[in-house]
Amino acid sequence: MKDDVKYSAMKPLSRREFLCTTCLVSTGALLPAFRPAWAAQPAIESAGEPGELNATDPGGIDLYLEHKHLMVGGKPGRAIAINGSIPGPVIRMQEGKEALIRVHNRLNESSSIHWHGILLPFNMDGVPGISFPGIPAGETFTYRYPVRQNGTYWYHSHTGLQEQLGHYGQIIVEPAAADPVAYDLEHSIVLSDWTFENPPSVLRKLKTMEGYYNFQRPTLANIDDQMEASGMSLSEVLEKRLTWDRMRMDPTDIADITGATYTYLMNGKAAHENPTFIAEPGQRVRLRIVNASTMTFFDVRIPGLPMTVVQTDGQNIKPVETDEFRIGVAETYDVIVTLPDSRAYTLFAETMDRSGYARGTLAPSRGMSAEVPEQRRRPMLTMADMGMMMHGDMEGMDGGMGDMDGMDSEMKGMDHESMGHKGMQYDMPQNASGDGQGLELPTSELMQSIQHGPDQHGPASITMAQSAYRRLDYPGAGLGDDGWRVLTYGQLRTLEEHHDRRPPTRQFDLHLTGNMHKYVWGFDGKKWSQSNMIRFQYGERLRINMINDTMMSHPIHLHGMWMDLYAGAEDYGDNPRKHTVIVQPAELLTVDISVDAPGQWAFHCHLLYHMEAGMFRTVAVVRSLEGGPINVKS
């Protein structure tokens, strides 16, 4: 046997065997050269492993910002990690105590942290250029502020496009008194979107080509699908397409950035990674859900399991049982669910444009999973989203387009009284610097619609809703046709009346404007760089009527003060309080504000690329509309 082995080892190679061996050896020597750089390094940690800290514990907490390579959805990406993870750690606080947070910036650039929805002194708000200079590279900034509220909130960078790289996390503030929400255990749910592209490159593409990431447009190639989805004939589909083209609009402009580049995450995990949240049958589970995305609205449901919504934007509301809700960027919702049995349930967060989803599992033990729902057909905008309301039928415009010239004439012929304006005046300058009337404004039965006046917004606004109207009971494009209950703003009622519900005595209109072709976004046709400060008078009760002239939904966020959303409640005190409100296309949405926070504050659309493109204002709280700003140190 040994001789056989020896003979075999010394056996001459044939020409074919020699060539094959040489090829294999050469390929093996070259393999390291073809190996990606990250593969040659030690194993890369995965995203989605956040810890938990308590900022009101003695001594406070430390947060470390640094660039880090992490596996996101199974692929390597370069993130801005907070304490080594994306999302950053869950930060807990106790109402009535003081938060102490030291932020160490280990990046090679300036950074910041904004405590979204938290009421605090303006110099602790974390907005560079507005409330503080930012945190320079290599330096530490200490945030210190009293905790005056409770509920579910979040934090994120307010510097450039850093938020897109994972610079965000959740905040949970425990109440000082007994919590009115009863539950056995809780889980933090942070929804977000991630791209492996460089964020400035994404913005450049949006500015270069309209709809760069929109691969769901109607085309001749998918005209059969359009006919099937709409129930229209070929001629009707073509006529509808031509009508939108004449208006230079696209009915699929639901989201600027889609699953063409985005990976959608739940607690830093992609859908196939299936993060699991443990709960036993019969337990009341509180899910604290934050939308920390940069650009993505999610439609959240748990098939087979009803949800009871108990809180929105950190504020307790009267419980509402529902099957699904849309959560805008920067909003938070707390829901209570109870597992009826020992099987798994899918927590499904589908994007508004249906180009992807985030997903997790609620189950008694790890390793379990439930069926993932089939994605629904992407929605199409309708004439209602252009303000084409006919005879008060707001949502009945999703069939054929009809005679657009006749519709235009009819819209122009409508008078304000017939549309429910009830004689309310809108004479405040659009920059909010006019003097108030001093009279109490109505707090119920507000006007239902308003016609658009002469266009004074210039090339920064190429779309114009002919009318804007209340859409409080409209769930949003693509929702409400499945037979499921869908939460709307019209269902939200505060659990307890808040301390200041005086009727407002001053109001102004604020138009949300945009030019998709140039990717310019703003208020009243102006970018932030072209605008003046909006002035709020300290101590006043102010009303803002937001009018969306664009075809997109915008989550509008006010720093430092609450917005009391007019949700149609019979009792004015029942209207909910929010820090971020979704303004849908062609919507007239009203918020009332108690101006009780001296300083300068940010007021902006929370779609990150819209904000970066100009949809941002600085609010200055002043002693009087004729005087200068308040000395906040006095």
Image: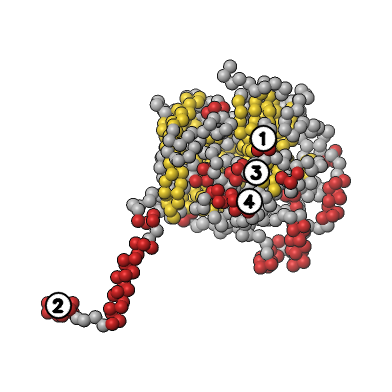
Query: Which residue is under mark 3?
Result: 554
Residue 324's place in the image compared with 217, above or below, is: above
Name which residue lies at 74% across and 61% down.
Answer: 241
Residue 43's place in the image compared with 317, above or below, is: below
Mark pair 1, 3: CA separation: 15 Å
In the rendered image, residue 498, in percent from the top left (x then y), is placed at 62, 27
Q: Identify the image quadrant of the N terminus.
A: bottom left
Mark pair 3, 4: CA separation: 18 Å
Q: Position of 612 compared to 53: left or right? A: right
Number of residues whose C-alpha sits closer than 10 Å to that of mark 1, classed few (under 14), some (14–19) or many (20 or more):
many
Mark pair 2, 4: CA separation: 71 Å
Q: Element type at marker 3?
A: strand
- Would residue 518 be visible to someone looking at this image? yes
In the rendered image, residue 385, in percent from the top left (x then y), is placed at 72, 49
Count the marks: 4
Mark pair 1, 2: CA separation: 89 Å
Dot in front, 2 or 4: 4
Q: Earlier in the sequence, mark 2 or mark 4?
A: 2
Q: Quadrant of residue 308?
A: top right
